[in-house]
Image (cartoon, helix red, strand yellow):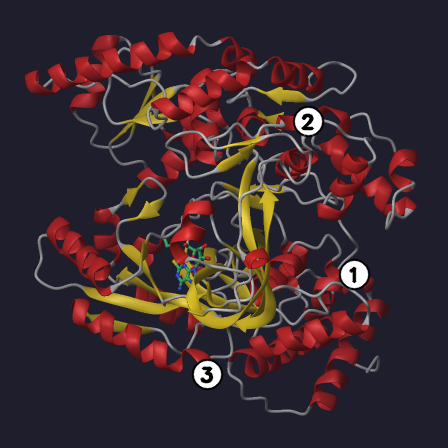
Amino acid sequence: MSSHARPAARAEALRREIERHNHLYYVRDAPEITDAEYDRLFRELVDLESAHPELASPDSPTQRVGAAPLPEFAEVRHRTPMLSLANAFDEDEVRAFDRRVREALEIEAVEYAADPKFDGLAVSLAYRKGVFVQGATRGDGATGEDVTPNLRTVRSLPLRLPQAPDTEALEVRGEVLFYRSDFEKLNARQRQAGEKEFANPRNAAAGSLRLLDSRITAQRPLRFFAYGTGIAAKARWKTHSDALDRLAELGFPVCRERSVAQGVEGILQYFSRIGKKRDQLPYAIDGVVYKVNRLDWQDKLGFVSRAPRFAIAHKYPAEEQTTEVLRIEVQVGRSGVLTPVARLKPVEVGGVTVTNATLHNEDDLRRKDVWAGDTVVVRRAGDVIPEVVSVREKGPRRDRDRFSMPHRCPVCESPVIRLPGEAAARCTGGLYCRAQRKQALLHFVGRRAMDIEGIGDKLVEQLVDRDLVRSPADLYRLDREALAGLERMAEKSAQNVIDSIRRSRRMDLARFVFALGIPGVGEEVAKILARHFGSLRALLDADWQALGTEKEAVRKDNAKRKKKGAAPREVPLEGIGPEIMESIDKFVHQRHNREVIGKLVDPVRGVTVTDAASPKGARAESMTFVLTGTLPGMTRDEARALIEARGHRVSGSVSKKTDYLVAGEEAGSKLEQARALGIPVLDEGELVQLLGKR
Ligand code: IVH
């Protein structure tokens, strides 16, 4: 086709045509041409682009084959945070949700938008001037990973939209997943190639989307379904269903099962209708999602912590199967807890082969009275670890079939204790115990912790068993030679691990604290700690007893203030209870832990823990902002997300502790209060300048 007079025009025509066929095939399920004809068009475009490299363009369908591997993913701050959903597990909880919504809105009946809850991976897609420019994973909700090249390979995801005012700047939210049939084929392929199979479609989707080499992603038939929009939805559409209609019109795959339902009876009917169809759907779902349809009402309802008040996920009950218990073993966890685990005769539960199920603890096992050889009911819900529910039929029950908690740790032989009032038996070996060390290390390198790639069970096993790594600090002294000597470690992968360790040397405080694995300190608590203390030093030097006392005092004072109608004071470390405070206190004062932390940050190993709010010219410690009035270019939630993403806080009322008031149009009494207290007032532009845009 080089005879075409204008290659640019021909390339453009081909791109449109190919994308139209992509849409017909992947979204509409209604192809108009044969595969061979499609391939011919595609070939022509590839040839044209290679003959005229100046024609190449990121929104060309030829880009769907993947690009050169990336060294790592860049971070993306979400302009609108990607939230999680609250769950309802039965009808009562759904009715309670509906009641809360109606009471808050002061109306009789609510119209809901309902759709399946896809069991895949959330992504956010950014379009500028109609062109797909960036796609990110959800990450922790505030920051995700830039997986644009991988998302370009998803055939049903439009690379280009019709030019229209609403495609100038559009953010689309949705789920990336595998159809069940594609998943089976993928696993068959993995098996043939001697590669590891994926546990379920969700894991396969997550793994495929997070490959640094998008050419491999291109060979994985991922799908995309849109279920919402980001920025400025309210300004463009009246209802959620209008927004989705528009997305469908623009060429996005929007699932057929979505619906609008009236009131709580409507959504409950929807739940049972989809429940009946569930097994026939091409993809896995674990529930349905209800959202208040009117966007202005959504806005009015707002959010509680990280989930919207206007939406809820209604989960289908977990799937159950029966199988035989081969034996019962104990597993040693990160903090030394011994968990009895039933090794099972393999059984399919909800599309996944299950070979182990937890028995939680000794009491639970006794209550259910489970013996080796029994036939039991096992249950699996979504990503949750399978559990033994009950005994269906007793086995022969010889003496040796009865479980008893060992008195010594099966891994390190330290004594096992069970504290009064605790359900768990624990190994007292601490980090002397290899099992605990392994678990602590796996936690440390985890994606949400130090995010060191390439270190999985197998490697940790070898590192610990060969005494190459005794504590996380030792990771930072590993070299390629040491790694290359291990099983399944080629030069290249050894280098990748070393590179990944190097990259983790710069880490923000919250993740670092989470990585330490302090009992009771999850991601949320770690964030609170980081915000409060601002630096690792301050956290290590804290006087926890004094903090506990201060906390109580502020609580009491606030109760008094409330009676007087005065504004409450900020409670230090709000959200962290006394048990967890005690656990942190204990942890940071243990000599061994201090030593490990000291080593991690020493110049040899060189981990730098960045203070909670260091980005871009902001002050090092956490600051308190108050928002008032309407900002011209962002919603309240967007402003809040920006502030929190930088490790600062947003408070509802102006006090001496307020660092800045951010004021928009029609700011009222808060502005006066701030002026009276001499607190600096920022407009939107100044806020963005202070904190940086992304
Ligand atoms: S709406 C503000 N709709 O569920 C509401 N989420 O727990 C945000 N998900 O990570 C989500 N199907 O990936 C919504 N039809 C659906 C969904 C859905 C699956 C996932 C989503 C998110 C998680 C929230």
State the SS at label 3.
helix
Mark 2 vs mark 1: in front: 2
Res 453 seen here: yes
On the image, numbered disc 3 is attached to which residue?
280
Image vertical order of residue 198 relative to residue 304, above or below? below
Mark 1 vs mark 3: in front: 3
State the SS at label 2.
helix
State the SS at label 1.
helix
**How far across and down, in percent of the image, does residue 663 sit?**
29, 27
Q: CA distance from mark 1 to mark 3?
A: 47 Å
Image vertical order of residue 350 relative to residue 75, above or below? below
Amino acid type, residue under disc 1 in the picture? Glu
Q: Which residue occupies 35% across, 77% down?
A: 274
Classify 10 Å Cα crowding around label 2: few (below 14), some (14-19), many (20 and above): few
Residue 54: numbered disc: 1
Amino acid type, residue under disc 3 in the picture? Gln
Q: Earlier in the sequence, mark 1 or mark 3?
A: 1
On the image, numbered disc 2 is attached to which residue?
432
**How far across and down, in percent of the image, does residue 81 sit?**
43, 44
Horizontal placement of 310 versus 565: left or right?
Answer: right
Q: Earlier in the sequence, mark 2 or mark 1?
A: 1
Q: Which residue occupies 76% across, 47% down?
A: 458
Amino acid type, residue under disc 2 in the picture? Tyr
Mark 2 vs mark 3: in front: 2
Instruction: Ligand 1: give its quadrant.
Output: bottom left
Please state which of residues 186 and 147 is positioned toward the viewer in this rendering: 186
Image vertical order of residue 49 relative to residue 208, above or below? below
Quarter in which the N terminus is drawn: bottom right
